[in-house]
Image (cartoon, grey):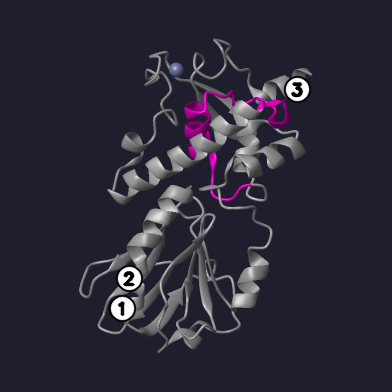
Amino acid sequence: MPELPEMEAWRRQLDDPVSAFPIEKAGPAHVATLKTFDPPLATLDGRRLAGAERRAKRLMFPTEDGELVLLVHLMTAGRLRYLLPGEKGPKVPAFQLVFEGGARLVLTEAGSKKRAGVWLLTPEQVAAELAHLGPEALGLGADRLAEICAAESRRLHSLLRDQKLIAGIGRAWANEILHEAKLSPYALAPDLSREDVERLASAIDTELARGLGLREQGAKDDKTYRVHKKLGAPCDVCATPIAQVDFEEHTIFYCPQCQTGGRVLKDGRLSRLLR
Ligand SMILES: [Zn+2]
């Protein structure tokens, strides 16, 4: 699933183009993709978008008149593309906006499962929809992170991915951040020292900024990640092969030298059964 760096790179890319021309026609939309029916999509026709905004892993396109917001959540397989007039696109996009002059914003989704969603909302509805989200991960800071860690007796990998606590990090960047911070994915948040928290806060910023920079240059996953999905590859700090462990329906990748003091982590699902 695209996380904060990927979504922010797309936001920056889309901000100017989507506001260049008024919308000529909104839709069509796949019945499973469009999550709202009132106001109807056609309400967007003739309006101009103000640009692209982002909150956590969602993109928002407010209208210039301030009355409506198109909210997009790509989930795992959704992709947004801006197509120039005449540029070839998918035959049946899950959703599209056609701009005056012929450019298009299209949402596609690989696979048969339609999980990505598009909502047409008022700004008040958007605020309610996003109210459950924690503070943005980028720029969170050590003080705020220390409060979150003290209040949540959770393993770090799970805490970092909880959008209600910190918004924008998923499993890939949780792996990268914990490796950079030299912390075990299984460490319990309240057990962190102040120094650990400071290292984690700084790793959140440096890793998300590194990811954003790479994604803006168009880097693919393999060039972007240093531990995520790198099982067996040498750790770029100590050359120990990267290890993996299953935990909470996810696979965690980590360096057993840098992060767990040489210990190999046990499968989180298995140890629950054995406990
Ligand atoms: Zn290492």
Q: Amino acid at mark 2?
A: Asp
Where residue 202 sits in the image (x, y, percent)?
51, 36
Q: Kindly identify which residue carries mark 3.
A: 273
Q: Kindly identify which residue carries mark 1.
A: 20
Tell me the SS state at disc 1: helix
| Picture quadrant of residue 238 | top left
Highlighted magenta segment, given as a residue range? 166-193
33 versus 103 height, above or below: above
Residue at the (58%, 70%) spot, across then down: 35
In front: mark 2 or mark 3?
2
Q: Is residue 19 magenta?
A: no
Image quadrant where one finds the C terminus: top right
Tell me the SS state at disc 3: helix
Circles 1 and 2, Cβ within 8 Å, touching? The answer is yes
Q: Quadrant of ligand 1?
A: top left
Q: Is residue 6 visible?
A: yes
Q: Earlier in the sequence, mark 1 or mark 3?
A: 1
Q: Amino acid at mark 1?
A: Ala
Q: Earlier in the sequence, mark 2 or mark 3?
A: 2
Where residue 166 sits in the image (x, y, percent)?
62, 47
